[in-house]
Image (cartoon, rainbow, N blue to C red):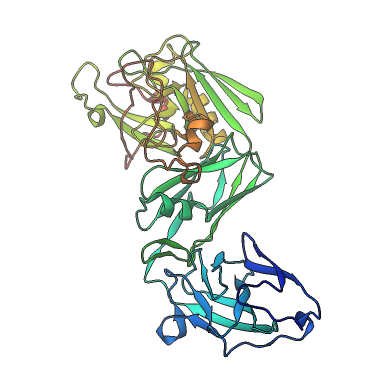
Amino acid sequence: MRHWSRHGAALRCALLVAPLAVGLTACTGDGDPLAAAPYDAAAKVVYGVASGGKADPSKPVEVSVKDDGSRITDVTATDVAGRYVRGELSADGLRWHSTAPLAAGAHYTIRVSTENSDGRPGRKVVGIDTTAAGAGLHVTFGPDAGTYGVGQPITAELSVPVKDPAGRAAVESNLRVTATPAAGPGSWYWVDDRTLHYRPSSYWPAHATITVRSTLSGVRVADKLYGGADKPLTLHTGDRIEALTDAATHLMTFKDDGKVLKTIPITTGKPGFDTRNGIKVVLGKEQFVRMRSESIGIAAGSSEGYDLPVYWATRVTWSGEYVHAAPWSEGSQGVANVSHGCTGMSTANAQWFFEHIRRGDIVQVVNTEGDTMSPFDNGFGDWNLTWEQWKRGSALSGGGGGVTPELPAPGSGSGDEGQTEVLQNPPSDPARLRPEAA
């Protein structure tokens, strides 16, 4: 029988390091001792774990053998789902340690293969647990479950800010989004340290089911910070609704799955109160709101002041831009832009629009002298970033977000009709509304 020496000269072995498991061996030899059943190597193998028998997930798991002529030939560490933990075996075969973070509060199975000085194989299998996480990082997905338009971004709000690029990458790689039918390639964008948005390269498919879930539970994000278990989210999309508002022609073209359903005469913001250009996502609908000029800094008694009850109002920015009924400006609709930033139309058309639109649908405005809607600070302007700009907001692509790209600004400013207040006793007949100031 040929004996294995410390330098491995007599036994022809190849040590293979795989991406997920370390130390796979292929051996040949005359009178092959590996043909024998492995002996119990419990007396030879030592595991480095914390007191109480649990491993600290923030530290590598270490496996070693006593220096009595034995060596480690193979180590695999897997979690309960069978996923491998990366690791590294020392050149002398005496020590192995994990090189990938372990999950907190998890169970791992470690299988160690050894070889003694006679070339006889040994085997030891042990289960270890990691200590539970101290602080927990939780994620809340949005919007609420329901049916939305094809432009609705997904949001993720973190309970703890994450600034480190490696921590952001760990978070982002564990936030999973799937769509049926399949959407185009998608990516998360770090709006700030606690907020992420997700969108595909183009709008979601119509009539799709979108599932969002976190696999962060137990994952190390930062020193002593681990992910917690959180609720998944399921959304649905309806028809592909797109309302194209052209300030130059004073017309809105309303499309449902590519088919034009209606062309509506409209008016947009007049000079100095120009409506924002760009793609806007419907935020909500209010059958009745009160619009007051004081909310945007215009005195009620001035020539531009107003205090108006407004019907059939569809909100597209948080600062107060709506598509709504404006019976006082019907003479200008389809002809001129006379509003303070909103898109106005007749009461009948506004009611029709209100009844055919839902949250997440697309309202795109073109050909105004206003600025382009910003991506994140006034609603969902996410689609105003190109796909290349969007991808740079991902920590997995070397970006990390938090910096909004420059957007084109054809004009000097944009207007809003103003913040709104629901009236307790609104007028019963919207067709009778008349402005105090136009």
Quadrant the C terminus occupies: top left
- Residue 111 appears left or right of 37: left
Q: Is residue 314 above or below residue 37?
A: above
Can residue 98 be seen here? The reply is: yes
**Nearer to us in this view, 66 or 393:** 66
Among the 4 quarters of the image, the one containing residue 136: bottom left
Residue 252, horizontal then vertical, whole percent: 53, 20
- Residue at horizontal 60 percent and vertical 22 percent from the top: 262
- Residue at horizontal 58 percent and vertical 24 percent from the top: 254
Q: Is residue 279 above or below residue 421?
A: above
Residue 292, horizontal then vertical, whole percent: 27, 30
Among the 4 quarters of the image, the one containing residue 51: bottom left
- Residue 358 appears left or right of 275: right
**Nearer to us in this view, 240 or 326:** 240
Say how many tags the image has. 0
Can residue 281 be seen here? The reply is: no
Quadrant the N terminus occupies: bottom right
Among the 4 quarters of the image, the one containing residue 407: top left
Which residue is situated farthest in the top direction here?
A: 335
Q: Is residue 150 above or below residue 331?
A: below
- Residue 407 appears left or right of 30: left
Residue 81, horizontal then vertical, whole percent: 63, 70
**Nearer to us in this view, 175 or 329:** 175
Residue 155, horizontal then vertical, whole percent: 46, 47
**Nearer to us in this view, 234 or 42:** 42
